[in-house]
Image (tube, rainbow, N blue to C red):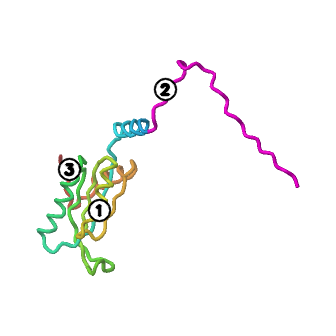
């Protein structure tokens, strides 16, 4: 039988003087500094959200759309374009509903706002489905060109 010899390299001693060494901040301070750096350098990004709900009355439809509009305003999001709610027949039943109302809002917001919006949608029983997408520069150009050529029943949002 052969015996395997394992050698362990010893760490080399640092021969620099103590005054030449830079102090290493604790990992927690590095993490906080990084988060602060990210927060200050965050830019608002373009998003579009569309949600499907089934209101029982026109007043409830207005209440739901106003609720999400004001939520975005409290999160300091800038509404760019808002499409008027559209009632439609669903291709298949969702929560025993065969018809619903779609509402779309295009807005600029910080990324943490999106997580809060998803949570709000998930907790609201009136929302049947929702979608939030981030728009890149090509999608923005396409949407602006489409809005310029068509006259749909949408209202541009003013701050």
Q: Identify the residue position indicated by label 1 in the image.
A: 50
Between the C-alphas of marks 2 and 1, the distance is 51 Å
The front one of 138 and 22 is 22
Residue 76, x across and y down, in percent: 23, 46
Secondary structure of the residue carrying numbered label 3:
helix
Q: Is residue 119 visible?
A: yes
Q: Main secondary structure of the magenta part?
A: loop
Task: Please name which of the two marks, 3 or 2, marks the residue nearer to the observer.
Answer: 2
Q: Are marks 2 and 1 in contact (CB under 8 Å)?
A: no
Looking at the image, the residue that sits furthest to the left is: 59
**Residue 101 visible, this angle:** no
Q: Is residue 104 left or right of residue 22?
A: left
Please state which of residues 59 and 113 is positioned toward the viewer in this rendering: 113
Circle 2 residue: 23
Residue 80 on the magenta segment: no
The answer to whether 12 appears left or right of 73 in the picture is: right
Measure the C-alpha gap from mark 3 to mark 2. Answer: 44 Å
Residue 127 versus residue 134 in the image, above or below: below
CA–CA distance in space, label 1 to label 3: 17 Å
In this picture, which residue range is highlighted in magenta? 1-27
Residue depth check, mark 1 versus mark 3: number of the one nearer the observer: 3
- For residue 73, the mark is 3
- From the viewer's perspective, is residue 12 above or below residue 156? above
Q: Quadrant of residue 122?
A: bottom left
Label 1 packing within 10 angstroms: few (<14), some (14-19), many (20+): some
Q: Nearer the viewer, residue 102 or 149?
A: 102
Q: Is residue 133 above or below residue 101?
A: above
């Amino acid at each position: 039988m052969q015996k395997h010899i394992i050698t362990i390299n010893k760490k080399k001693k640092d021969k620099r003087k103590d005054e030449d060494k830079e102090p290493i901040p604790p990992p927690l301070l590095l993490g906080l500094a990084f988060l602060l750096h990210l927060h200050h350098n965050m830019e608002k990004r373009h998003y579009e959200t569309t949600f499907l709900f089934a209101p029982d009355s026109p007043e409830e439809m207005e209440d739901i759309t106003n609720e999400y509009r004001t939520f975005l305003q409290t999160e300091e999001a800038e509404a760019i374009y808002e499409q008027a709610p559209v009632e439609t027949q669903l291709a298949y039943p969702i929560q025993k509903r065969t018809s619903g109302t779609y509402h779309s809002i295009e807005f600029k917001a910080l990324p943490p706002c999106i997580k809060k919006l998803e949570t709000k949608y998930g907790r609201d029983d009136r929302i049947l489905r929702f979608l939030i997408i981030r728009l890149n520069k090509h999608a923005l150009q396409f949407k602006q060109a489409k809005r310029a050529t068509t006259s749909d029943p949408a209202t541009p949002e003013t701050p």
